[in-house]
Image (cartoon, helix red, strand yellow):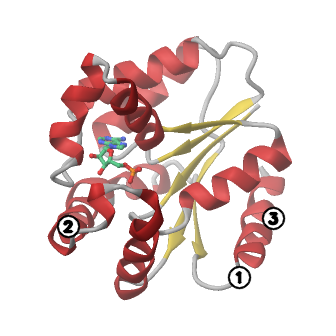
Amino acid sequence: MLNIVLFGPPGAGKGTQSEKLIEKYKLTHLSTGDLFRKHLGEGTELGILAKKYMDQGHLVPDEVVIQMVEDKISSTPDSKGFIFDGFPRTTAQAEALDTMLQKNAMSISGMIALDVPEDILRERIKERGKTSGRADDQDDEKITTRIKVYLSETLPVAEYYEKQGKFTKIHGVGQIGEIFENISEVIDAY
Ligand code: AMP
């Protein structure tokens, strides 16, 4: 079973690559950002809670995210494996994910980190904001906050997997298809 953490800052291309990867490897896409946006659209209690944080570019509290991921994993028992996109975003989430997977006799195959310089991230996020309708994609200050939060709270997660010998960095600038080929090569080696 393949369980992959697709990692990188906002705008790195995780969503785009995930779509292609789930098609190729028949995996389940688990994007915590997408799940929160779904709850938000449906006006659930969880969505209303998450919105307060998302609108500011801050992280939703760990316990809320972890519970949502646990529910998603247990409601997909027939999955051939997961692409985790936008999760884990803190070391506490990474530890919780390991525990969750162990309970189900699964583990993380590896983390693939998309490396993109900050100026390109900003350009991509603003471009996406023209069509995504996402408030957090359209405001310079919110984009700055999201990048800062990534650097301070999320980047340590890379080290967590590096220590386990499960970390690979991929250059995330260039043709989408070429980046996809490079990611596929890493996955094929798992
Ligand atoms: P994304 O679509 O991954 O950029 O996520 C959009 C927003 O959802 C983030 O800026 C956070 O507010 C929230 N979010 C998504 N995933 C997580 C997570 N793993 N931990 C905490 N907050 C998250």
Q: Secondary structure at mark 1?
A: loop
In this orientation, which residue lies closer to the viewer: 128 or 149? 128
Residue at image point 27% right, 56% down: 135
Q: Secondary structure at mark 2?
A: helix
Residue at image point 77% right, 27% down: 80
Mark 1 or mark 3, which is nearer the start of the sequence? 1
Question: What amino acid type should be assigned to the residue bearing mark 2?
Answer: Lys
Residue at image point 45% right, 25% down: 69
Residue at image point 48% right, 20% down: 100
Spatial CA distance of label 3 from label 1 is 16 Å
The answer to which image quadrant residue 37 occupies is top left
Return the residue at label 2: 148
Return the residue at label 1: 175
Question: What amino acid type should be assigned to the residue bearing mark 1?
Answer: Gln
Spatial CA distance of label 2 from label 1 is 27 Å
The answer to which image quadrant residue 35 occupies is top left
Report x, y in % for residue 40.
33, 32
Report x, y in % for residue 13.
55, 66
Question: What amino acid type should be assigned to the residue bearing mark 3?
Answer: Glu
Residue 112 shows up from this direction:
no
Q: Does label 2 point to a residue whose CB lies under 8 Å from ligand 1?
A: no
Mark 2: few/some/many CA within 10 Å (<14, 14-19, 20+): some
Mark 1 or mark 2, which is nearer the start of the sequence? 2
Which tag is nearer the camera, tag 2 or tag 1? 1
Mark 2 or mark 3, which is nearer the start of the sequence? 2
On residue 185, which mark appears?
Answer: 3
Left or right: residue 48 versus residue 1 is left
Report x, y in % for residue 79.
73, 23
